[in-house]
Amino acid sequence: MTNGKSNETRSEGRDSGAPGDTAGRAPAEERREAGDAAAGVSSDSESDGSSQSGGSPGETKGSSRERSGASAAITGDDVPASGPTNSREASGSSGSERRVDGFSGDVAMDDLELEGESGEAPDEASRGLFDDLLEGEPIFENKEVLRPSYTPQQLPHREEQINKMATVLVSALRGDTPSNILIYGKTGTGKTASAQFVSEELETTSQKYEVPCEVEYINCEVTDTQYRVLAQLSNKFIEKNETHIEARLEDLRALGEDAHDSPGALEDAGYDDLVAVEDEIERLEADLEAFDQVPMTGWPTDRVYQTFFDAVDYHERVVVIMLDEIDKLVEKSGDDTLYNLSRMNSDLQNSRVSIMGISNDLKFTDFLDPRVKSSLGEEEIVFPPYDATQLRDILNHRSDVAFKSGVLTDEVIPLCAAFAAQEHGDARRALDLLRTAGELAERDRTETVDEDHVRNAQEKIELDRVIEVVRTLPTQSKLVLYATILLEKHDVHTINTGEVFNVYKRLCEEIDADVLTQRRVTDLISELDMLGIVNAVVVSKGRYGRTKEISLSVPLDETEAVLLSDSRVGEVEDAQPFVQARFDGS
């Protein structure tokens, strides 16, 4: 009964006010009772015991368990209310000693404070990542207004072009076939925004007068093959036909129910009897079942065209197909698509199709078949570049909606307009510049957008443009550019075509790429010059002929990082020997 003896000893010590005193002994019966409680009836004593000074050892044991809390549950023994115990006891016949409390420290469990119980504010490091960022007052009211995808309700300085498009397309509201339209203009001159504005107005007016007229938009920079164009158009018209049939079926079923109460309803709807209505419902359900979406690959082109033809001609309507970046389609897959679309009206029974093409290239029609050119270019509309004053009007109009009141300083919009006017009057560039300036101001947590933000935005956009151009260069052009960078990086002040070619040749050998002729490398340098990446000036060397002196027009470190991110160019490990051997023509 060793456990009982120990328990009794500690209980007496606590009752007498001397926890460490173990001299007093209880009678043998009480020791046996305490031992029994420790061995088998601890749960009873935990539930029934109460804290009573001077009680029996067993009762004292129960109360001590309640006071010790979690520590007693862990060790199976009772623990003093405060401080570590120094008492040792014999364990069975082995005579070995152990600590009673089972803990190595001197902290009572009741004194421990769990996380979150102190009531103190959480540590600053526990704040969310975006909490501080959200505390600042936003500068933008509606940032989407400054994005190219936004179609405004008003397009300043494009009234003439919009009115011309409207006068051509108004015939669609009369049920006639509109003339095909070709729209030309440089990037950011409002071509697509104006065409989409007119298209939305056309569809809205057609619904108002209940004239079936639809406009379908295709971006040919993304959908750039005949198969993809026809497949996308087919699936769009199939979806519209399904919606049309489902609405028609709903009306016919309602008509059949009304016919029982009002027989005259059938005659008003143009049906002789209910059998005719049921036949029409069966026909429409069969048509609905027969529609089959065109997969993006796998079908013969003639089958895709026939599916598109049947879908367009399913019911009476006038369709305007808007082909944005139409020159990309012609460049990638020729003019077969345009030929088929421009000639299909002669075979259509119920519908009529008109084409609206949008292009940045004013000369792309020079490569078209004469028959396509004559039918496609029935009406031509040119969008001239914006000047600085017009750009300022556009930015003022957009900024009223995009920004909160008073956040733009007076010089912001004129400076954005001036920067964009320097690059062929690109309104898209002006809007990007204004939006980026606002984003930089938000990151700085300032309350206004000023001139410095605009200038920083100009540098950022220019760097982003350079990175994108360099990233999309062909591998051979990247190698030529990398050779130029290596020469300039190693303090070669006058870089000519011969030196670039020698370093380029070593780079090609290093990564096992084909080596182009020096004449072809000279052409690639000219292309880089046209892109604004390098500056190549032809200089005369007298009787030694002429050569090009080349220098970089873009940031060296950023451009080199983009080039080395390419898997092929990045294979070059040590370019120093190539630069040292630049005069070696072998």
Image: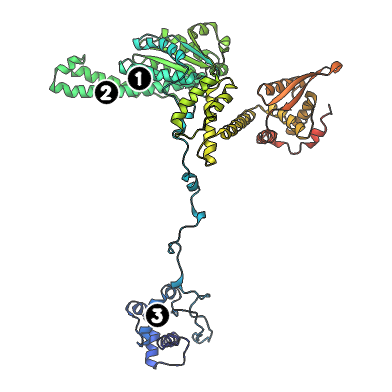
User: Which mark sits nearer the N-terminus, 1 or 3?
Assistant: 3
Kindly report which numbered mark, 3 or 2, lies closer to the viewer in this rendering: 3
Of 370 and 71, which appears nearest the observer? 71
User: Extreme front residue here?
Assistant: 410
Q: Which residue is mark 1?
A: 204
Left or right: 281 as drawn, with respect to 314 = left
Res 36 quadrant in image = bottom left
Q: Can you say which quadrant of the picture contains the N terminus?
A: bottom left
Residue at 49%, 82% in the rendered image? 85
Type of the residue with mark 3: Ser
Q: Secondary structure at mark 2?
A: helix
Asked if the residue at tag 3 contacts the one at tag 1, i.e. Cβ–Cβ closer than 8 Å, the answer is no
Dot label at residue 64? 3
Is residue 246 depicted above or below 117 in this figure? above
Residue 123, horizontal then vertical, whole percent: 50, 57
- The x and y percentages for residue 393 are 49, 22
Residue 377 % position (x, y): 50, 8
